[in-house]
Image: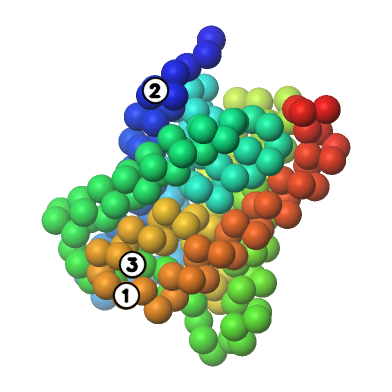
Amino acid sequence: MSYSNLQIFIVELIGTFILVVFATGSIVYDFQTGGTLGIAFAAVAPFIALIIGIYSFGKISLAHFNPAVTIGYYITGHISKIQIVYYFVAEIIGAILGSIFVMNFIGTGANLGANVPNYDFSIILIFFVEVIASALLMAVIFIVVYTNGLKGFSGIAIGGIVAFDIFFLAFISGASMNPARALAPALLSGVLDNLWLYLSAPFIGTIITAFLFRNKFSLKN
């Protein structure tokens, strides 16, 4: 069954909204409780959000919820150029609405959950780690798409790699992997200093992975 661009737009907006509420809201809530919940809570929250989003909307839109993932899917021929616009707009609006929800119903601490790199490390390492985290996410997504080995476990696998990246890599790069998730809290909190990192590195990571997979599995061939 094929779905219209409007249907795709709606579910991508809803899915991104859910992801941002869970991913950033967990950080804000942890801040309000004095950091007692820690990185594990911040990792599990988007894992749960992605399970909800992927199993609810995966058959309609492939459950991107992430502009960097959308570009990866375009490179491998899953979506058209015009669909990029629908995805991007839906993801950005969904993310902003998510941050507005967090701001009004959870709190405004921790800059609304904006990603923060650890400048105790070099900017080169920080950038590289963010690229790697995003590349790993895209790789797991394509493994789910192109194989039957994870059939029925797509949400767990994709949510799991996001949780893994956050748990093990966020202390270096912030582990956004998602330009929309990074953009919304940064804009609404006015903390834009680190935004360049999250609007560049995730795209590089997913593009690298997409070209690697396209060479072997491309739908265009």
Q: Which residue is mark 1?
A: 191
> Is there CB contact under 8 Å for labels 1 and 2?
no
Point out the tag, 2 or 3, that comes first from the N-terminus: 2
Type of amino acid under label 1: Val
Displayed quadrant of residue 134: bottom right
* For residue 27, above or below residue 97: below
Is residue 100 toward the left or the right of residue 52 in the image?
Answer: left
Q: Which residue is mark 2?
A: 7
**Residue at 53% of width from left, 10% of height from top?**
1
Q: Nearer the viewer, residue 7 or 132?
A: 7
> Residue 103 sits in which quadrant?
bottom left
Q: Could you say which disc has been placed on residue 186 in the image?
A: 3
User: x and y percent of residue 186 in the render?
Assistant: 33, 67
At label 3, the amino acid type is: Ala
| Element type where label 1 sits in the image | loop
Asked if the residue under mark 3 is in contact with the one under mark 1, i.e. CB atoms within 8 Å, the reply is yes
